[in-house]
Image (cartoon, helix red, strand yellow):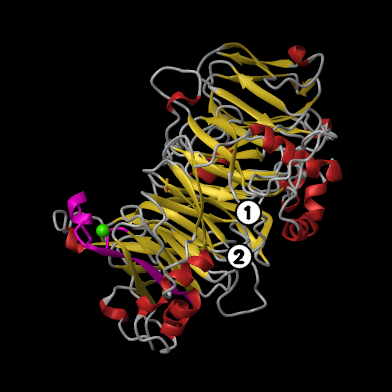
Amino acid sequence: MTKNNSQDVEGAGIGRRRFLNSAAAIGITSVGLAACQESSNTTAAPAAASGPANAAAPVANAHVGGAGSAEVKPGQLDTHYALWSSGHTGDARVLGIPSGRELLRIPCFVPDALIGWGLTNESKAVMGTRADGSLRYTVGDTHHVHGSYKDGIYDGKYAWINDKINSRLARLRLDYMVCDKITKIPNVQGFHGIFPDRRDPVDPAIDYTTRVFCGQEFHVPMPNKGAHLEDPKQYHCLFTCVDAETMDVRWQARIDGNCDLVATSFDGKLAASNQYNTENGALYPDMMAAERDACLFFNIARIEQAIKDGKFTTIGDSKVPVVDCTVEANKDPATALSVRVSTPKNPHGVNASPDGKYFICSGKLSPTATVIELQKVLDWFDGKLEDIDKAIVAEPEIGLGPLHTTFDGKGNAYTTLFLDSQVVKWNIDKAIQKHAGDKEINPIVHKLDVMYQPGHINATNAETKEADGIWMAVGNKFSKDRFLPVGPMHPENDQLIDITGEQMVLVHDNAVRPEPHDFIIFKRDWLHPKQVYELDEHPQATKDTDSAGVTRNGNKVTVRMISFAPSYTPIEFKVKVGDEVTLFLTNIDKVEDLAHGFALPEYNIQFVVNPQETKSVTFKIDQPGVFWYYCTNFCHALHLEMRGRMIVEA
Ligand code: K7E
Ligand code: CUA
Ligand code: CA
């Protein structure tokens, strides 16, 4: 095992930093850097993230990384963005890499007190309410987050994230970094894996994301209305396609067994899900009964043609067309909508290599990874491959408890080993050569201890065709002794690893609140968030002080308020007990970073309005008195004076 030498790491980074000396350099020089790295085996390669210009001697050691320091000094910026799932805090997080600093949380499935998510009318409309106006759900469990693609890389438009508890798919707008739509997936429990398509399977002109695929992990009776309660053989799972733009559910596919993770091919033709419960078992010994499970492939063009041809059913109240992707109905390659490639028992994780050629399933209970060649799966659908398992081109032994895999764009895969508490770097081509019969070849390049029990893993740009092989993050499920003790609930440990060299180098421990699952990391040039809202994003925006004021219609009162540092207009308003007040607050400040808050005592109200943003709340007046509303977000030297009175007459 490697011993990390922080001296070497630092020195190796500095060698490059002398040339680059700027965080900005990384975005525009990645091609040059890659070339440089290949041409020399003895000088450290890519890309100073952030380190200081420093004339220290470079260390000539190709084995250690050259990504530089994880420290981002004051005044410097991270080189990469990362989107992180949060697990059962139910939101998404935005991080800077390499620093690992959390920059933002994007609420979606659960309320968020800071910005008033789940409290404003706008956020409630996105989240969904019951007839009495209360939120339908206040818990969520986010596992997987992925961005929208164009030309095989992220276009910075959207990201999608799943809620495993209540089977909802949320879309995040990446311009304002807010959730703008949530879709409830019908007849599904345990919605786990998601992946956007990376181009259209039929129309070559559509080289961007138009669908999001969603896997169901927990099989249930269909419809789940009281029939077949005790008979798991009658339970099923659905694989669901959601329209990326409208967020409507386009179609579903009924399958045998379950879906765990989901991946899509870069050519748009195939989506796949690993299945650990091909047995349709209800208890875990049942789920472990079969010697092999599967990776299930969906032929998207054929499924959509079948729907056009009317070959579908529906389930219960749902109008969504459901095609039959069960094993029995799809034996003939000429007409099959789906096919199973076998894997060792109970696999976890399926990831697409950035060259577009392979899907890799991790063994979990088997010490192997299964490499499936996508062209061979397509050949099977074309009648050119007799045995579908011949699509397996490698099954290297990599270590104990393999879960997820990522890539460096140089032909190497990196897989987390949950039981070994390690990451293993292995070479895909060598694994294929070994599988083909060259027993002398060893595909394992390096193993690195991580702390502890790693789950997800992702490298910079690695879910795109431009994997840059600079940084890699590993989400460790346990942190034990790595941080100061804080009682029984430990933080998790997201570790940063430099992958520029032949050997991986552990660079940074990052304590995170439990418990993220998956994440993506990508270069910062791919995202262009806006700092100021478009006033017209909200149809009820109040554009100036003259349009602000109070109108009454019976006992319904509408307050149009503006904020402009350091005051509200109107600065006071009168209502009566029994009124229902809807208050629209528009922040007409145009200055970047000049947000205001609005808190109202006794009415459980607090929210934030960003520059040029409008939000509204509706509440019933139930007590007379004076109620000071005030600004919660520090905005001005006179921020504390930014307040006004709601005067309530009996
Ligand atoms: Cu992506 Cu954590 Cu839901 Cu694997 S799962 S670890
Ligand atoms: Cu406005 Cu503080
Ligand atoms: Ca199984």
Q: Residue at x 23, y 60 (%)?
A: 280
Query: What residue does disc 1 label?
Result: 158
Residue at the farthest left position: 230
Is residue 92 left or right of 535 when viewed as pictured? left
Badge count:
2
Locate residue 331: give its quadrant: bottom left
Query: What residue does disc 2 label?
Result: 209
Q: For the residue marked with disc 1, what is the amino acid?
A: Tyr
**Magenta-span inclusion, residue 356:** no
Pick the residue in front: 596 or 305: 305
Pick the residue in front: 54 or 451: 54
C-alpha distance separating marks 2 and 1: 10 Å
Residue at the farthest front position: 440
Pick the residue in front: 625 or 92: 92
Image vertical order of residue 452 relative to residue 353, above or below: above
Q: Residue at x 53, y 36 (%)?
A: 494
| Circle 1: element type | strand
Is residue 237 left or right of 600 when viewed as pictured? left
Q: Classify mark 1: residues with Cα within 10 Å, few (<14), some (14-19) or many (20+).
A: many
Locate residue 396: give its quadrant: bottom left
**Magenta-span inclusion, residue 288:** yes
| Circle 2: element type | loop
Is residue 319 left or right of 47 when viewed as pictured? left
The boundaries of the magenta stretch are: 276-300
The answer to whether residue 101 shows anywhere in this view is: no
First reached walking from the N terminus: tag 2 or tag 1: 1
Image vertical order of residue 250 relative to residue 139, above or below: below
Q: Position of residue 131 (x, y in %)?
A: 41, 41
Pick the residue in front: 284 or 196: 284
Whether residues under marks 2 and 1 lie with C-beta atoms below 8 angstroms apart, the answer is: yes
